[in-house]
Image (spheres, coloured by chain):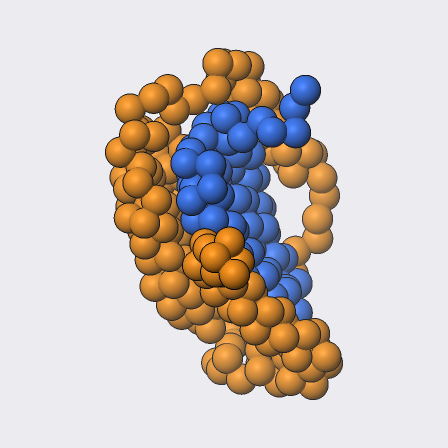
Chain colours: A blue, B orange
Amino acid sequence: MHGISPLHYLIVSALLFSIGVTGVLVRRNIVVILMSIELILNAVNINLVAFSHGHHHVTGQVFALFVMAVAVAEAAVALGILIALFRNRGTVLADELDLLKW
Amino acid sequence: MIEAVLFYIFAALTLVGGVLTITRRSAVMSAVWLTVSLLGVAGLFLTLGAEFLFVAQIVLYIGGITLLFLFVIMLVNLDAAAQVRQFRRAWPVVVLAGIGLAAELIALLIKGKVEWLAGSPITPGNSEALADLLLSHYVVAFEIASVLLLVALVGSVLMGQQRKRSKEQVEG
């Protein structure tokens, strides 16, 4: 077994990204869909840090930090919206929110 | 050698946690497995030499976002939601598409020729290097990110207050 290159990390990142995309598309519960979005953002972060490691430069880690900040903001607002949604519609299933469908 | 072992342990944690996150029936179990997956990602950051991001990942994601998810699961009554069908009817198609996407990405990654710099960058003081870059070259983006966090804070509080305000409007 030879050494671990950044390519290994990129493959883990690709797999995690695919898991997240599958989760967004397959689940009905909005809470779990939001969790899958967090998985996708984490896959992006692994990618950025792996490139930062492979090119011996810290910029990728700065970007990963910004991704984290935006992810936190997104999670806070999305969960606030979710609570308001549950109060108004009484459901957390994505396919029951079809007011705009005709 | 120890690097390889640690990498495979953390990669397994990340991927198994991710798969269980999207397949568990109960949202609480999903949140728990999400925590495991995020811990695996934190470990991967550590093996890549990104100590600051490792700590930020644990404090922000595991301490912050997972807790937020658990609070929302508690506030939003999910007992009724756990009784019904959890997956869309077209789930086999979606799973096939996900596997196809993964295969395509991995094929592209393996075919692509990226020149990696040899050796591992010895960075004693990863946090210092990060802070230097963050507060010099990316200082504008840093300030914008702080404003964004403030807006998100106010926005989420406003979302939580919605019902009380609309009741006052109805009475008034």
| Residue at the image position 54 percent from the left and 30 percent from the top | A97
Residue B10 placed where, x, y %?
A: 37, 49
Q: Compared to A62, does A72 lie above or below?
A: above
Q: Hey, which quadrant is residue B116 in on the image?
A: bottom right
**Is residue B127 something that shows in the picture?**
yes
Residue B132 placed where, x, y %?
A: 62, 85
Q: Compared to A86, does A98 lie above or below?
A: above
| Residue at the image position 56 percent from the left and 73 percent from the top | B150
Q: Hey, which quadrant is residue B33 in on the image?
A: top left
| Residue at the image position 48 percent from the left and 19 percent from the top | B88
Between A2 and B137, the residue placed more toward the observer is B137
Between B136 and B50, the residue placed more toward the observer is B136
Q: How many marks?
A: 0
Residue A91 placed where, x, y %?
A: 42, 34
Between B19 and A75, the residue placed more toward the observer is A75
| Residue at the image position 68 percent from the left and 20 percent from the top | A102
**Is residue B46 something that shows in the picture?**
no
Residue B158 placed where, x, y %?
A: 51, 63
Q: Compared to B111, does B59 lie above or below?
A: below
